Image: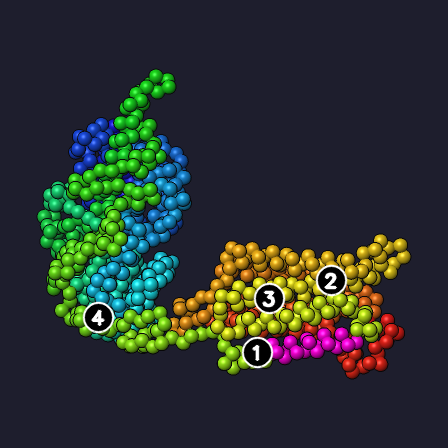
C-alpha cells in the first residue's frame, strides 16, 4: 500500500505513491532548501520505521510558489486535487496517487488562499509560517493546523524581554500592508499598557527587487533618515518574510549611504532569516550582531546531520531544486556550455554543505524545517491510526475487505485533533482545540562573524504552559551584544511617566498633562453660558408676552395650551445645556443626555400636535365630516403624552443597562487628560438622537403636506421651516461630534441644542410676537381671519 503528502515550498502534499516528485522551478533563496530536505528526511524516517504505516509507503510532491500571487496559489491548489498533468478539478483518474494532506506555506496570505479551496474537500492543511492572517478564524478554516503558536504570545514575550533589560525606548518596523497594520495596532497598545515608549514606526514596502527599491529609497530618503537620527538603541521588527527581505536591503543602503550607527539591538519575531542572495555576499552582517529573535522552537532529530552528509547534486534524480541551490550556494556551475563562456568555476559535486556560511545554509534544523518535520509525522501517525481503526472493522457491508486506498483525507481529522506523540528529537507534539501546535519559542541570540557566517545560540525559552509571569526564562550570561551597544547608557534614555504626565521630546522628563473639560472659566465656556442665558431670557419673554396677551385673537388662534407647553419645554432645553458645562460628575452624566432627549421630545411632540390640530380643524369645517368629533384637546393630549413616553422608555432602558458615567480619556490627546462623560452605550445615545430626528421629520412631512391650506391656517408654513432648520442642525451634528475630542465635543452638542431650539423659537413665535408687540392694530379678530 502507498500513501501521499504534498509540500508547497512553500507547498508540500502527501500522496499514496512511493516515488518522489520535485518541481523543476528554481528556488528563490538557497536557505529555503533546508525545508525541502526536512520534508524528504521526515518521509524517509517514516518509511524506514516498521512501527508506523508498515504496509504503506509515503510519497511527496513539492510545488514552488514563486510569485506570492493569489491566482497562482489557487491554480496550484486546484492542480493538487486533479489528476496529475491533467487540470480537471474534482476528477482523479490515477488511483495510485491519493492526496492525504497539504503543508504550506511560509506566508499567511498563501495559506488562506489554499484553505479557501481545500476546506471544501476537508483536506488537512498545515501552516508552518506566519499565521497572523488566520488567527481567530477557526470557523472559516476548520481543517487548518497551525504549527506556529499564536503571534500575540510572541508579543507578550517581547514585552517581558524589554522589561527584563529595562529597555523602554524602542523603534518599530512593519511591512506596509494589512498584517503590518494589525501588528502595529496590537503592539502599540501593548507597549502603552506596559509603559514602554516608541520613538518611531517605520513602514517598509512589500517585497520588491533591488532596482525598484533603489528608486523608492532615493525618492523617500527622509522617511529612512529616522534610522540615523533616532536615539533608540532597540529595534523591534515584525518578522513577516516580506518585511525581512525588504528591510535587509534598506538597511544595506542606509548603511552604505548614510553611515547607519552600529550597536543597535534588533528584536525580531519568529520569521527572521538571512535570505537575500544578492546581498549575502556583500552585506556586512555585523549590523545584526547580538540580535535577539523569538524563533520557533526546534530540536535536532538524531539522524538529520547524517542525512545532510549524503546530499549531492546527483543524490535524487527528481530533485529539481538542487542544481540551482548548489550553483548559488557554492558560486559554481554544474553544466558547462561550449557555446557560451562561463564566468563561474565548475562544480565538482563533492562540495560539503557544512562548509557554507549560515546565511546560505544552516546545518542545524531551523524552526520552519522542524515544523515541516513534525507535520509529516503528525500526518503519518494519524494515517496509521486510521488504518488501525479500519482493521478493527475488517468486513464491509457487502462482506468485502476494506482496502487502504479508500481512506479519505477527512478521516484524519479525528486523530489529528487528539494526537499526542514524542518525535525522534524527544519533543511532545500535539494540537490544542483551535488546531494550534502546543509549543513555545526559543529565545535565540544571533552571533555573526566577519566571513558572513553566524551562529544562533539559544539563550532562553518562552513557554505558554508556564505559570503567569514565568513564561519567559533568560540566561543573561550567555548573551552576546554588539561591541558598540551601551546598555547602561540606554537604560536612562526613556523615563516612565505616570498617567497624569507625558514625556518630553527627549524622553528624559515628564510633563504634567493638562486637564481638559468644558469649563466656565474659559472663553468658549463663558460664551456658551451667555448664549444659554440669552436664549432662556428670550423664551421667558415670549412666554410672558403670550400670558399677558392670552385673551387676544392671535394668541387664541395659536392653540394656547400647546404654545405654553412648547415654550416651557424650549426654556428647559436651553437650561439643560448647563449640564454639559463644568467638570463631569456622576449625576450630571446620568441626567444630561436623558434630560435633553425627553425635554426635546416634548417640544417636538407639541409642534407635531399643533400641526395635526390645524389639519383636523380644517377638515372639521367640511359639512358632514367625522373629523369634527376629533378636534379639541383629546387628540393634542394624546400626542403630547405618547411621543415623550416612547423617549422616556428608551432613556429608562439606557440608564438601567448601560448608564453614562464620568470617565478619564488618556489616549486621545497625548498632552491632555480628557474628563468626559462616557455614554456607556453609544448605540443608546444615537437611538435617543435618532428618535428626535424621527419626530422632527414626521412634523416636517405633515406640515409640508398641509402648507397650502387656506391662509388663516398658514402656521404650517412656519412649522415646516422650523423643522427643516431642526433636522439640518442635528444631521450636521453627528459627523462634527465624531470628529472632535475633549471639551469641543460638549461644545458642539451645546451649540446644536441652542441652534435647534432657537430655530423653533424664532420660526414659530417671532411672527406672532412681532404683531403683538409692534403691530397691535393687527391683533384683532378680523385681521387674524384674514392674515393668520
Residue found at x 36% / y 41%: 143
Judging depth in this view, the residue of 707 and 599 nearest the camera is 599
What mark, if any, has residue 596 been given in the picture?
3
The numbered mark at residue 319 is none
Please indicate, yes or no, whether residue 34 appears anywhere in the rendered image: no
Residue 609: image tag: 2
Question: Which residue is denoted by mark 1 in the rendering?
Answer: 529
Q: Secondary structure at mark 3?
A: helix
Mark 1 or mark 3: name the one nearer the start of the chain.
1
Whichever of callouts 4 and 3 sits on the residue coming sooner in the sequence is 4
Which residue lies at the image location 53% right of the left edge and 56% below the top edge?
656
Q: Position of residue 450 (x, y in %)?
A: 12, 64
Residue under the image location 54 percent in, 57 percent down? 654
CA distance for labels 3 and 2: 20 Å
Q: Is residue 685 visible?
A: yes
Q: Which circle, 2 or 4, is nearer the viewer?
A: 2
Horizontal side, residue 337 vs residue 665: left or right? left
Amino acid at each position: 500500500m502507498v500513501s501521499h503528502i504534498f509540500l508547497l515550498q512553500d507547498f508540500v502534499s502527501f500522496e499514496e505513491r512511493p516515488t518522489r516528485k520535485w518541481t523543476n522551478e528554481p528556488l528563490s533563496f538557497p536557505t529555503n532548501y533546508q525545508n525541502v530536505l526536512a520534508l524528504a528526511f521526515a518521509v524517509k524516517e517514516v518509511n524506514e520505521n516498521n512501527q508506523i504505516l508498515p504496509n504503506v509507503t509515503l510519497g511527496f510532491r513539492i510545488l514552488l510558489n514563486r510569485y506570492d500571487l493569489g491566482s497562482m496559489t489557487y491554480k496550484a491548489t486546484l492542480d493538487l486535487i486533479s489528476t496529475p498533468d491533467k487540470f480537471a478539478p474534482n476528477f482523479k483518474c490515477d488511483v495510485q496517487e491519493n492526496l492525504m494532506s497539504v503543508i504550506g506555506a511560509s506566508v499567511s496570505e498563501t495559506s488562506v488562499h489554499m484553505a479557501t479551496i481545500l476546506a471544501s474537500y476537508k483536506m488537512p492543511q498545515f501552516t508552518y509560517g506566519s499565521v497572523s492572517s488566520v488567527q481567530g478564524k477557526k470557523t472559516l478554516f476548520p481543517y487548518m493546523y497551525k504549527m506556529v503558536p499564536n503571534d500575540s504570545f510572541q508579543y507578550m514575550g517581547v514585552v517581558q524581554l524589554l522589561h527584563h533589560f529595562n529597555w523602554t525606548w524602542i523603534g518599530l518596523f512593519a511591512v506596509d500592508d494589512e498584517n503590518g497594520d494589525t501588528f502595529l495596532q496590537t503592539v502599540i497598545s501593548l507597549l502603552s499598557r506596559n509603559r514602554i515608549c516608541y520613538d518611531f514606526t517605520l513602514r517598509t514596502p512589500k517585497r520588491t527587487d533591488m532596482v525598484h527599491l533603489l528608486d523608492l529609497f532615493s525618492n523617500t530618503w527622509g522617511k529612512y533618515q529616522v534610522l540615523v537620527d533616532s536615539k533608540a538603541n532597540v529595534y523591534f521588527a515584525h518578522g513577516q518574510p516580506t518585511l525581512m527581505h525588504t528591510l535587509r536591503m534598506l538597511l544595506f543602503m542606509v548603511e552604505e549611504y548614510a553611515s547607519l550607527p552600529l550597536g543597535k539591538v534588533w528584536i525580531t519575531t519568529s520569521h527572521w532569516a538571512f535570505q537575500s542572495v544578492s546581498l549575502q555576499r556583500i552585506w556586512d552582517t555585523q549590523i545584526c550582531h547580538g540580535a535577539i529573535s523569538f524563533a520557533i522552537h526546534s530540536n535536532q532529530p538524531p539522524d538529520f546531520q547524517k542525512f545532510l552528509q549524503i546530499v549531492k547534486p546527483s543524490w535524487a534524480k527528481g530533485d529539481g531544486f538542487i542544481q540551482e541551490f548548489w550553483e548559488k550556494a557554492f558560486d559554481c556551475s554544474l553544466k558547462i556550455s561550449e557555446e557560451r563562456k562561463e564566468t563561474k568555476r565548475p562544480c565538482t559535486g563533492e562540495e560539503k554543505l557544512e562548509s557554507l556560511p549560515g546565511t546560505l545554509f544552516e546545518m542545524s534544523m531551523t524552526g520552519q524545517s522542524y515544523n515541516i518535520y513534525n507535520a509529516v509525522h503528525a500526518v503519518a501517525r494519524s494515517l496509521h491510526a486510521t488504518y488501525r481503526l479500519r482493521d478493527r472493522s475488517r468486513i464491509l457491508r457487502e462482506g468485502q475487505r476494506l482496502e487502504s486506498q479508500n481512506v479519505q483525507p477527512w478521516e484524519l481529522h479525528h486523530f489529528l485533533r487528539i494526537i499526542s506523540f514524542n518525535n525522534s528529537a524527544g519533543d511532545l507534539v500535539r494540537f490544542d482545540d483551535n488546531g494550534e501546535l502546543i509549543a513555545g519559542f526559543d529565545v535565540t541570540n544571533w552571533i555573526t562573524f566577519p566571513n558572513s557566517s553566524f551562529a544562533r545560540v539559544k539563550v532562553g525559552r518562552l513557554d505558554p504552559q508556564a505559570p503567569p509571569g514565568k513564561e519567559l526564562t533568560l540566561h543573561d550570561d550567555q548573551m552576546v551584544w554588539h561591541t558598540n551597544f551601551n546598555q547602561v547608557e540606554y537604560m536612562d534614555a526613556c523615563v516612565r511617566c505616570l498617567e497624569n504626565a507625558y514625556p518630553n521630546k527627549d524622553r528624559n522628563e515628564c510633563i504634567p498633562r493638562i486637564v481638559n473639560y468644558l469649563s466656565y472659566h474659559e472663553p468658549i465656556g463663558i460664551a456658551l453660558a451667555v448664549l444659554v442665558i440669552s436664549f432662556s431670557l428670550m423664551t421667558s419673554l415670549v412666554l410672558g408676552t403670550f400670558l399677558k396677551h392670552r385673551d387676544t385673537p392671535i394668541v387664541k388662534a395659536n392653540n394656547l395650551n400647546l404654545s405654553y407647553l412648547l415654550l416651557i419645554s424650549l426654556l428647559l432645553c436651553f437650561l439643560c445645556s448647563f449640564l454639559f458645562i463644568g467638570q463631569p460628575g456622576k449625576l450630571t452624566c446620568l441626567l444630561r443626555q436623558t434630560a435633553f432627549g425627553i425635554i426635546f421630545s416634548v417640544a417636538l411632540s407639541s409642534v407635531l400636535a399643533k400641526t395635526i390640530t390645524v389639519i383636523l380643524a380644517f377638515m372639521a369645517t367640511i359639512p358632514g365630516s367625522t373629523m369634527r368629533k376629533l378636534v379639541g384637546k383629546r387628540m393634542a393630549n394624546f400626542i403630547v403624552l405618547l411621543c415623550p413616553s416612547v423617549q422616556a422608555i428608551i432613556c429608562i432602558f439606557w440608564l438601567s443597562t448601560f448608564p453614562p458615567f464620568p470617565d478619564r480619556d488618556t489616549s486621545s490627546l497625548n498632552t491632555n487628560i480628557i474628563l468626559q462623560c462616557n455614554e456607556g452605550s453609544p448605540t443608546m445615545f444615537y437611538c435617543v438622537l435618532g428618535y428626535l430626528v424621527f419626530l422632527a421629520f414626521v412634523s416636517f412631512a405633515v406640515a409640508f403636506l398641509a402648507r397650502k391650506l387656506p391662509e388663516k391656517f398658514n402656521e404650517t408654513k412656519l412649522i415646516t421651516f422650523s423643522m427643516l432648520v431642526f433636522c439640518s442642525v442635528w444631521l450636521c451634528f453627528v459627523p462634527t461630534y465624531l470628529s472632535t475630542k475633549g471639551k469641543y465635543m460638549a461644545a458642539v452638542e451645546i451649540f446644536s441644542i441652542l441652534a435647534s431650539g432657537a430655530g423653533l423659537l424664532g420660526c414659530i413665535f417671532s411672527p406672532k410676537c412681532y404683531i403683538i408687540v409692534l403691530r397691535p392694530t393687527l391683533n384683532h379678530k378680523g385681521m387674524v381671519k384674514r392674515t393668520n
